[in-house]
Image: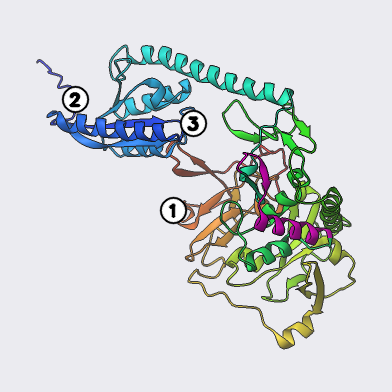
Amino acid sequence: MQIKIIEGSTVRKGKQRVCAYCRVSTDAEEQENSLDNQIAYYKGFIQSNPDYEYAGVYSDFAISGYKEKRPGFQHLMEDARKGKMDLILTKSVSRFARNTAIVLKATRELKELNVGVFFELQNINTLSGEGELMLSIIAAFAQAESESGSMGAKMVYKRKYEAGIPVQYLERSFGYTKNEAGKFVPESTEAKWVKKIYKMAAEGYTAAAIKRILNQNGVLTVGGVKWIDSTVFRLIENEIYEGDYIMQKSYVNEERKQVKNRGEVNAWYITDDHQPIVSRELWQRAQDGLNQKREYLATGSIVEDFSEENYPYRNKIFCAECGQPLYHRIYSNGNRLCWDCSGVKRYGKKYCKGINVPDSVIREWNFDENIFIKVADRSKGVKQFSYTKESSWRRRNKQKEYITTAPPCTQDNYPYISKIHCAICGSKLTRHIQKGNKVIWICGGYKRKGKAFCEGVRVPDSVIRRFDITTDVYISERKDKHGKKHYGYSGKKPGRNTAGCQTD
């Protein structure tokens, strides 16, 4: 008996679906024209070939090929995973990517999907036998060329820094503009607001109060958006407004990311670099005002294990607006503790405006029964707190209801409620209702103690219902290379998590 093997074919019958990828790394006008020309060329080239079916042209403008997270490139890969193409045309390896690892990772994934990449300049097709070897060599040269250019640019800036030649970016700063001579000078309207901001900070206004005043007056940031607390802090703490300048506050690391300089590279402080907007005296008074606020919030704040012994009031404090209990939150890298409204966290700001009470304030009060805390803002934004005992509060108020279609959190509705735990730290999972009444289960350790304690898991209730849970299980989640989440569980209790924390 003879057996004939009929081999499967991965070759698609009919026309090849062909697309192209183009990229330019700067936003210069000539580069923009170059990108338009490339797109027009590839579109015409593909459509004029009778063996090709046009599948589009993907492009990225003013983005370095060293980065993997390019919108056009990511869109290309997503469509390839959906089976929308058979061949990708691109000018050269360096246009596709300048990082060897990215080139090989992408082309190997595309090869698994039976999608080829043809690099015109190098005449390489990744589906050919020798394609990957040649590609590895050429990609390494492209990366080396890119790194050499980057090093050269860094040396130019370094020599300017060492020579004391300012490399300024004040055009990105609120309050400054360039005059006809090319020098940075205060912009009259914005400079007036800069002075007001510094005066308010010096007089004791909080960043939140300053932000509110700016937004009420229709003042926009240099980016054309509304102010938030952090933008106010950055402006007040910026030395440019007293006429000084720090060169190399940030730098580009080995991954080509702009990061804050925390002493990894040299920095240069230049005094009297340009025309100031505020006096040195006012600038310092504003810094003192901010520091006093930070000291006030941190004073008396004790961050310890969250037990009844350390925080005897932890289950006795509630929000006077909605009646929900307060939960603890840690700020300032673990140095400051506050108590926040859980109603806002669970149901959003439409349900309750919320409250944020420093732990030091509550420690000063003496009470045995439950209390409901309210807050009043002074004109400068300094918050003043008071409380009402539960018996008095309930005579005039009642806890707000949150209308949801999710069933009550009971053993009958969720028979696994006491059996599901986090696979990282071992904490029980707690129910959380998202917008749209979707129920998810979150690591209790992460929820109570934050990310420093545990990275946590977030599992949809619909997933847990598919598990046949009859005993304690420890649920984990992971993402695949396409970003899709997968869940699993085990009966084995974890030890220490990756953050080095003990299980509950």
Residue at the (71%, 58%) spot, across then down: 192
Q: Residues within 10 Å of mark 2 (few under 14, many from 20)?
A: few
N-term-proximal mark, 1 vs 3? 3
Q: Residues within 10 Å of mark 1 (few under 14, many from 20)?
A: few
The Cα–Cα distance between marks 2 and 3, rounded to whole angstroms, is 37 Å
**Disc number lying in front (2 or 3):** 3
Which residue is at the far bottom?
395
Q: Left of 204 or right of it: where is 255? A: left
The Cα–Cα distance between marks 1 and 3, rounded to whole angstroms, is 39 Å
Helix, strand or loop status at disc 3: loop
Q: Amino acid at mark 1?
A: Arg
Q: Which residue is mark 2?
A: 8
Which residue is at the far front?
180
**Disc number lying in front (1 or 2):** 2
Helix, strand or loop status at disc 2: loop
The image's mark for residue 466 is: 1
Q: Amino acid at mark 3?
A: Lys
The magenta segment: 180-202
The image's mark for residue 67 is: 3
x and y, in percent, of residue 485 in the image: 46, 44
Q: Quadrant of residue 113?
A: top left
Helix, strand or loop status at disc 1: loop
